[in-house]
Amino acid sequence: MSKSGTQADKTLRLLAICGIIGPILYTSVLIIVGLLRPGYNHVTQYMSELGEVGGPNAIIMNIAGFTMLGLLMVAFAFGPTVA
């Protein structure tokens, strides 16, 4: 085995990183899009309101927030199958 590890080790590491990046990315997008929406209050309003149809910056929240979190978490879930 080389110093850099096997292909399975590299894949497992990448999938674990997906599990770390997903929630960080989602939280960052949530805060940024919430700040860009006039009158939005993170405490009293639902997060899903940022992605509602016709909402300002909804496309950003739907793609960079909800969709990316989902894809990264699905990738993370495949980690145990690689080990």
Image (cartoon, helix red, strand yellow):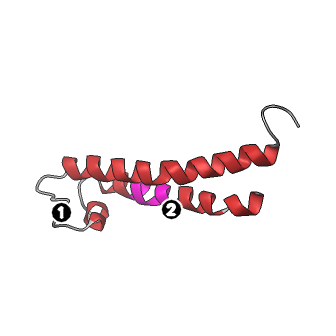
Q: In x, y percent, where is residue 36? A: 21, 47
Badge 2 amino acid: Gly
Is the residue 2 above or below the residue 75 in the image? above
The residue beneath circle 1 is 43
Q: Position of residue 1 (x, y in %)?
A: 88, 37
x, y percentage for residue 34?
23, 53
* Location of residue 45 (image quadrant): bottom left
**Would you say 56 lies left or right of 81 here?**
left
Residue at (35% x, 47% y) in the render: 28
Is 1 or 55 nearer to us in this picture? Answer: 1
Instruction: Identify the residue shown where x is 31% and y is 62%.
Output: 51
Q: Tell me if residue 12 is in the magenta stretch.
A: no
Q: Nearer the viewer, mark 2 or mark 1?
A: 1
Crowding near the residue tagged with mark 1, few <14, some 14–19, many ≥20 C-alpha atoms within 10 Å: few
Could you tell which of marks 2 and 1 lies nearer the N-terminus? 1
Q: Which mark is residue 55?
A: none
The range drawn in magenta is 62-70
Rendered residue at 11%/56% (across/down)? 39
Q: Which residue is mark 2?
A: 70
